[in-house]
Amino acid sequence: MLHSPTEPAPTADTLAHSGTKPAHWLATATAVAAVIAAAGLVQPAAGAPAAAPPANGPQAAAPAVTAVAPDASAVTYPLDCKGAPQAVTATAQGDLDGDGRPETVAAVRCDAGSGTPPHALYVLIRDPAGDAHPRIVATLLDTDRRQTATDLTVSDGAVTATLLGYSSPEVPRYSPDVKKLAKWRWSGGKFRQELTDPTAKSV
C-alpha cells in the first residue's frame, strides 16, 4: 500500500499489533462452519421424500361405505287383509346377528280404518348375494296373537317391544287391558324370545 511522504511508514512492531493472527482466522472459520451446519439442519436433504399430502388431498383414503338397513316400505308382507292395504306403523334398525350389516324390524298390520288390528313383527335383510331387495327372514310376532306392538327398538343386538293385548274376548278391541315387555335375540341360528315379565300387567 502506498503512503504519503509526510506520514511515517509503519514499523514492524506496528504491523505485528495490527495484523491478523492465525488464531483469529481459525476462530472465524470455525464460526462460519457452524453457521453452514446449522443451515443444513433446517433445509431438506437432497433426495429426501416430499411431505405427505394433507388428509383431504387427492391421495386421501376413501371413506368406508356404511351399510344401509332394508327399506320396510319395499316389502309385501304375508298378511291377509281382506282387500285392505297393509300399513307399516313402526320400524327399528340394528345389527342383530353380528355380521356387520343392519337388519330392519317392521311392525305391520292391516289398515282397516277402524278398530285396532293386531300387529305382526318381521325381520328384514338385504341379501348381498342377490339384487339387494329386502326380504323377510323371520316373524317375531304373528297376528294370531291379537296383540298391538308399541315402543319398538333395537339395542345391543336385541329387539324389544311393548305388547298390548286383551284378557278375554269380551274386552273391546280398541281398549287393550294387558301390557307386557317382550324381547327377542338371535341365538343358535334363530330368534328366541326372552322372558322379560314373569306375569302380564293389567292396564
Image (cartoon, rainbow, N blue to C red):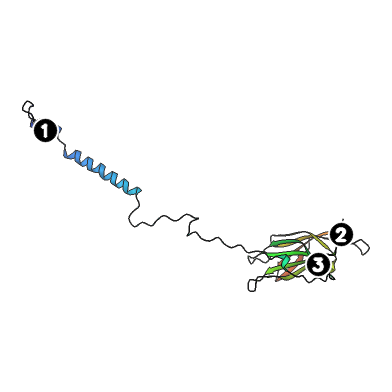
Q: Which residue is mark 1?
A: 15
Q: Is residue 188 left or right of residue 199?
A: left
The residue lying toward the viewer, choosing from 179 and 75, is 75
Q: CA distance from mark 2 to mark 1?
A: 119 Å
The residue lying toward the viewer, choosing from 164 and 8, is 8
Q: Quadrant of the C terminus?
A: bottom right
State which mark lies toward you, 3 or 1.
3
Of labels 2 and 1, earlier in sequence is: 1
How many other residues sit within 10 Å of disc 2, few (<14), some (14-19) or many (≥20)? some
Q: Could you say whether the residue bearing mark 3 is in a helix, strand or loop?
A: loop
Q: Quadrant of residue 34?
A: top left
Residue 4 sits above or below residue 161 on the image = above
How many other residues sit within 10 Å of disc 3, few (<14), some (14-19) or many (≥20)? few
Q: Amino acid at mark 1?
A: Leu
The residue lying toward the viewer, choosing from 202 and 126, is 126
Q: Which residue is mark 2?
A: 178
| Picture coordinates of residue 67, whole percent (x, y) | 63, 64
Q: Residue furthest bottom?
A: 130
Residue 72 sits above or below residue 28 on the image = below
Residue 85's label in the rendered image is 3
Q: Amino acid at mark 2?
A: Val
